[in-house]
Image (tube, rainbow, N blue to C red):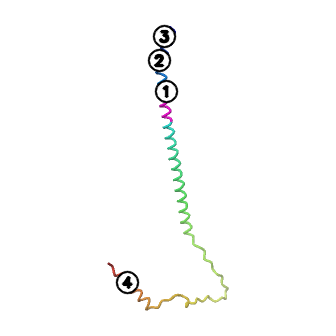
Amino acid sequence: MRALVFVIAVAAAAPAAAQDFRNIAASQEAQRIAEAQAARSRDIVTTNALSTLQAQVQTSQALSDIGSLRVRPMVPTVPLGPHTPAPRIDTSKFASIPDAELAASNARVRAAADNRR
């Protein structure tokens, strides 16, 4: 009787052992897939966080640039004494174009602008 029970136990254990191996292999494969998906999800979360931080930095930089454009620079003034005469500007050192040359240049520009092909 013991032999019969032993034979039945061994016969029943063989397919059960094979089934356990298949289940273990399937479980390990499922675990690897889950770990890969979790790693991918972490990568996506990290990428999104970096993109958000980059957008925030760019926004703050743009706002800073706009703020610096709004500030007018301080023009230094030279304090003059109460009896100091106003400064004189020597206009002879400025560039000047005679009226005839300016008119001729203007005419050439207009002629070139009217000459459309």
Q: Quadrant of the C terminus?
A: bottom left
Q: Residue at 66% of width from left, 84% of height from top?
A: 80
Q: Residue at x 48, y 13 (%)?
A: 7
Quote the CA–CA distance across marks 2 and 4.
Answer: 106 Å
The residues tagged by marks 2 and 1 sit, at their Cα atoms, a distance apart of 15 Å
The mark nearer the N terminus, 1 or 3, is 3
Q: Residue at x 50, y 89 (%)?
A: 96
Mark 3 / mark 4, whichever is N-terminal: 3
Residue 17 at x, y percent in the picture? 49, 23
* Label 4 Cα neighbours within 10 Å, binned few <14 / some 14-19 / many ≥20: few
Q: Nearer the viewer, mark 3 or mark 4?
A: 3
Please report contact status of discs 1 and 4: CB closer than 8 Å, yes or no. Answer: no
Q: Which residues are magenta?
A: 21-31
Kind of element beneath mark 2: helix
112 vs 26: above or below:
below
Q: Which mark is residue 4?
A: 3
- Dominant SS of magenta comes to helix
In the picture of the structure, the residue carrying the numbered disc 1 is 21
Q: What residue is disc 4 on?
A: 110
Residue flagged by tag 4: what amino acid is it? Arg
- Reading the image, the residue beneath label 2 is 12
Q: Secondary structure at mark 1?
A: helix
Instruction: Say if mark 2 contacts mark 1, CB within 8 Å.
Output: no
Separation of residues labelled 1 and 4 (CA atoms):
92 Å
